[in-house]
Structures are given as structure tokens and as C-alpha cells.
Amino acid sequence: MAGASTFLALNNGVRMPALGLGVYQSSPEQTVNAVATALACGYRLIDTAAAYGNEAQVGEAVRRSGIDRAEIFVTSKAWISDYGYDATLHAFDRSLRKLGLDSLDLYLLHWPMPTDFDATVGAWKAAEKLLADGRVRAIGVSNFSPKHLDDLIARSEVVPAVNQVELHPFFVQEAVRAADQRLGIVTQAWSPIGGVNRYRDAAGGEEQDPLAHPVVAALAARYGKTPAQIVLRWHLELGLSAIPKSVRPARIAENIGIFDFSLTRDEVRAISALDTGARGGPDPEQVNTRLFSFRIED
Ligand SMILES: NC(=O)c1ccc[n+]([C@@H]2O[C@H](COP(=O)([O-])OP(=O)(O)OC[C@H]3O[C@@H](n4cnc5c(N)ncnc54)[C@H](OP(=O)(O)O)[C@@H]3O)[C@@H](O)[C@H]2O)c1
């Protein structure tokens, strides 16, 4: 299974790097350095969101890097309190202003709002307008189940290019991956190295941490790689995009060191077999502006 591409083709022909840096929980103070380090290490995809509070620092690092803007793939996300057609158009302008950029490469709806799907559809229609106006190169969704995808597609024109979901060896999302594939949507893994299991349930300890699992550890020893590198390579072998987060330079470099080896089909299967069926993050069915009541400041 050698030779997995370092780019994935989206359904509108745009090329997206398979591996990127995530910046959720990177403080504004940490974010400029994390993004600058990542760009220097060869990352060309940065994943932020209005809700992360660090779009300004992502933009600053992108602009300061001296790398041609066209070579860097910048993703941001509309937060749920900004759903509805007009509010999402406003939110996009606010994100661009904070980033200090003229356009985005990918704009995602951060979560479905199953209890207010009309507002979710309104947000999507705004994203379609931004795409048509050339202000963003691709649009997509995040945390959508197969049913959310079908419901959205039935009520709109553009099929999402990307569905970004929680996905790691303990939660492999087979049904979502199958639906995405059927619809021509690229699946992008958040918490690709299982971060959510560590920071949301510290009490679970090593049992919750896919990086500490013996199957992953044995493969790390076999290839002379770290557990994180094994798991990130597993994502690539499955044809997924992955956006690991770190604010530590050594780990940022480690996490991109996955393009000089490959896993066999059986090794990929052995990692996929670690699935527990249990997500570490919020259940998308429960997400609405009562569960997450904060709003994004202009
Ligand atoms: N769409 C959504 O709803 C959603 C939700 C969550 C996340 N995301 C996106 O996905 C990105 C990644 O997800 P995530 O942050 O939840 O989890 P993750 O990337 O799986 O894990 C990040 C955690 O692992 C640590 N880490 C990083 N590299 C490591 C390594 N090589 N070895 C051991 N530990 C390592 C990090 O700590 P240090 O920083 O201290 O290294 C951090 O605590 C986010 O930053 C965000 O961009 C999206």
C-alpha cells in the first residue's frame, strides 16, 4: 500500500493536502509559533474555526511565512450561533477579516444542528453563495451523520466536498466513511491521534489512549516510528485526511514524518479492529445553541 498521495482531490477538482495542522485549543499565544513551525516543516494545510479564537494568529503566521498564499490551504468553520443565510454570510466576512486573508480554501459548517435543521440549511445556502462568488475554493461540513448528509443534499445544490468528523483507531466511523465515499465526499479526521479521549476523559487513562495500545506500540517498534506516526499513516492508507494538533515543535515535526513508510493491508486492518464504537466528543444529535451557548465576537 505504498505511495498514498499527499494530496486528495475534492469533488470540484480542488487539491487538498492530506495532512494538516489543527489548532483547536492552541491558545492565541501558542498559535503563531505552532503554525509557523508547521509551515517550516512542510505542512500546507491549517485547520482553524471561528470558535477556536485564533483565526487572527493563524492569518498572521500564514502572512509572515513568506510562502505563496496559493500554496497554503486554509480551512475555517462557521459556528452554530451564526447559522442561517444572512448570519453565515456575516460570519464568513468576520472570519476573513480576523484571518486577514482575501479568500478561504475550505469553509465548513462546524456541526449539524438537528433540532434546527432549517438554520443549518440556511447556513449551507450561504456557503453555496460564497463558493459561487469565488470567495472560497471548496465548502463542506463537519460532524454530519449519513442522515444529516442526505437531508442536506436533498435540500441544496452543492454536495459537500469534505466531512470532518471524529475519527481515530478507537472510533473508526465505518458508516460515515461509507456514506462519504458513496457521495464523493472526502472524510477528514479530527482527533486523528485520539486527542479527544485524552483531554475529555483524563480519568480513563491509558485505556482510552489509542497511542498507548499494544497493537500500535508493536507497529511503532516494527517500523522504528512513533505511535502517533503509525496512527497518522493508518489514516493515509485509508485515503483520509488528518489534522493532528500540537503546539510542540518536536511533535509538529514528528506528525508529518509519515511519508517514508507504509503499512500493509493486514496492519491497517489490525488498527481498524481497535474500534470501540464509542465517540470521545459530543454526539452530533445533541448539538445546538443550548448545549454550546457561546457566541463569536465581531
Ligand atoms: N470539527 C470539529 O468538531 C473538531 C473537533 C475537535 C478537533 N477538530 C480539529 O482537529 C484537530 C485535531 O484534533 P484534536 O486536537 O482534538 O486531537 P489530536 O490531534 O488527535 O490530539 C491532540 C493532542 O495530542 C497531543 N499530541 C500531538 N502530537 C502528539 C504526538 N506526536 N504524540 C503524543 N501526543 C501528541 C497534543 O498535545 P500538544 O499540543 O501538547 O503536543 C494534544 O493534546 C483540532 O486541532 C481541530 O483543528 C475539529
Image: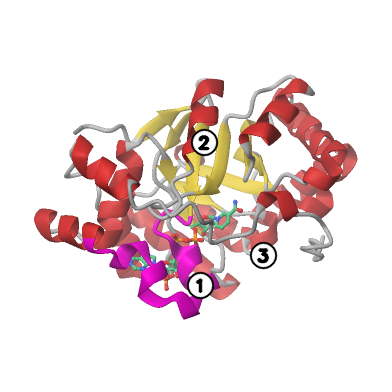
* Region of the chain picked out in magenta, as a range: 191-214
Amino acid carrying mark 1 in the image: Tyr
Ranked by sequence position, the earlier of labels 2 and 3 is: 3
Q: Which element carries disc 2, helix, strand or loop? A: helix
Q: Which element carries disc 3, helix, strand or loop? A: loop
Q: Residues within 10 Å of mark 2 (few under 14, many from 20)?
A: few
Front-most of residues 70 and 249:
249
Give me the C-alpha separation between circle 1 and circle 3. 18 Å
Percent across and percent down for residue 102 are 66, 41
Q: Which mark is residue 99?
A: none
- Quadrant where the N terminus sits is top left
Q: Which mark is residue 53?
A: 3
Q: Which residue occupies 84% across, 62% down?
A: 290
Query: Disc 2 or disc 1, which is closer to the eye?
Result: 2
- Image position of 80 with respect to 11: above or below: below
Percent across and percent down for residue 228 are 30, 59
**Does any atom of ligand 1 lie closer than 8 Å to the CB of label 1?**
yes
Q: Residues within 10 Å of mark 3 (few under 14, many from 20)?
A: some
**What's the magenta bit mostly, secondary-structure-wise?**
helix
Give me the C-alpha separation between circle 2 and circle 3. 32 Å
Q: Which residue occupies 24% across, 58% down?
A: 216
Q: Quadrant of residue 234?
A: top left
Amino acid carrying mark 3 in the image: Gly
Query: Disc 1 or disc 3, which is closer to the eye?
Result: 1
Residue on which disc 2 sits: 175
Ranked by sequence position, the earlier of labels 1 and 3 is: 3
Q: Quadrant of residue 129?
A: top right
Q: Which element carries disc 1, helix, strand or loop? A: helix
Residue on which disc 1 sits: 199
Front-most of residues 17 and 81:
81
